[in-house]
Amino acid sequence: MQDLRRNQLVWLDPQGWLQVQSHVWDAEAQALLAHWCDHDLPLVVCRQRLDVAPDQLCLGLPAPRQWSRRRLALTVGRDQVAVIGDFPTLRQVAQALPWGPAALELDRALTELAVTPRVYGSHAWQWLTQMPYLHGDSDIDVTLEVPDFQAACEVLALLAAADLGPRLDGEIVFPDGQAVAWRELQRLLTGHTAQALLKERQGIRLATLAELQKLGICTPDEAAHAMPCHEPNAIVVRAQLADDALVGGPPSGRWMSGPVSTAAQKFGLAAVRALYAEVALEPKPGLVSFRDCGSHTDMDAQTFMRSLFALRGYFPRMVRAGHTGAPFAVLEGLGKNAEARMLTATGGINTHRGAIFGLGLLCASAGQLQAQGLPFTSQHLRGALLSTWGDALAQRAKAARLSAPVSNGQRAIRRFELRSAGDEAAQAFPVLFDVTLPALQAALRAGAGERAARVQALFATMAALDDTNCVHRGGIDGLRFVQASARQFLQAGGVLQADWVPQARAMHSAFVARRLSPGGSADVLASACWVRLTLQSQMSASSMQSLPELAA
């Protein structure tokens, strides 16, 4: 008999049912057990009590409403288990339910991570037994098996961004069967608590972030990447990350009325995944990763995770506003609201201002594409941006050039005739679509893995972008150093070199020594990841055989 884990299903043989029903039960329990036996229904493996013999198994039977929702605790011999199975998948349960479309989009995104969400709790038992378990406030409980802590973080980002209607709860399960509630892990990552409850086969205990980061099959080097710069109890967080609790809730009005559509959910999930992909990437010269804090002393990967969770509702709202053709002033208002959420969540630290602007505009453009009934391609995306908000963006960029500069970045743009983020947006993001995306695709076609291709795209962006973050930190000489270093790396072969990782990490050390951080390039990379994830999702949904052409 294999070593069973919590939340597995088992079916008993006749001898097992005879043993169970031989105990003294009240009339209601006897009727319940008789029904379960007669209809060959499963039981669930529970946490194994320490006082139970090794050849015995602790099981549970959660009853439906007609038996007062009782929970029976059973103990049987392991040799009396006839069949072992699993709870149904999210896809199976969601098919015929009102929240099904949004759940299928979440399932698709998780499947791309090689994670299969399984439903337990009331929704699963009603699906298994065809008896009434659900009520108006029933949660959707899911288990998600992950290989390591890095995967757990990416899964967590998707769960936090999902909006299925009913509350989404459940556990992230590591390879040895240890499990943590995903909402508790979220609180731990965002610094709201110093420990999370870790459920093990024979008990529960409190675990720190450092202990959770060691779970799974990651190598020692990968485990080092997952270590943040600070312990969570050293971080003061004032944010309440519930979606509408910050800064007075989301903007309202006719541009934002109605529920978030499945399309908006899809684009929003891709945005959260893209932001996670950027922060999790390493090596990444001068920038924050799970490995270290880069050139920054005021932020770490946890800061980015808090920001990411705070922004999870912003991107679907931008898609919805874009779908309605909202004027640019509405998009700007949504962006300012999102920025306030970010600053509240991070204690005033700017982690994603550039992504709020750039990636937010792209999400709005995707919504406009949906409204026009056009397929998602780079050319159509850029066209929707320019035709709907191009004039407003051009006027905004012109006004910024004519007004007195109020920041170091604006002064540098004026003095050295650099292109600002506003200029990039007004021209439909030429660096993103003409440099970053082609570099990402070319690296993948050349055989580079996902991580290496993203690094290649980042270096290509660093070589081409007028990144005012670098000017702010190192003057114009700092920007030229970043651009020249990136070009040198690419000219030597980029990530197709056998030793590209130590080379990129050496450059990281050089950037840190000069306090250089190409944050603008990181924002463009996140946008490139979003476009690619969205193209992949479209391909999966329509069973396409090849990706649409990325070039404009």
Image (spheres, grey):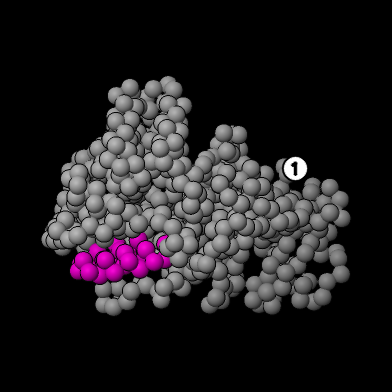
Q: Residue 343: x percent and y percent?
A: 42, 63
Asked whether the viewer can see residue 520, the reply is no
Q: Which quarter of the rendering shows the C terminus?
A: top left
The answer to whether residue 397 is above or below residue 501 is below
- Taking the spot 38% from the left edge, 28% from the top edge, the residue there is 495
The answer to whether residue 481 is above or below residue 171 is above
Q: Is residue 417 left or right of residue 7?
A: left
The answer to whether residue 154 is above or below residue 65 is above
Label 1 environment density (alpha carbons within 10 Å; few <14, some 14–19, many ≥20): few
For the magenta stretch, what is the residue range? 314-342
Q: Nearer the viewer, residue 269 or 528?
A: 528
Q: Nearer the viewer, residue 80 or 53?
A: 53
Q: Is residue 89 left or right of residue 362?
A: right
Q: Residue 102: x percent and y percent?
A: 41, 62
- Taking the spot 25% from the left edge, 70% from the top edge, the residue there is 330
Q: Which residue is mark 1?
A: 1
Residue type at mark 1: give it. Met
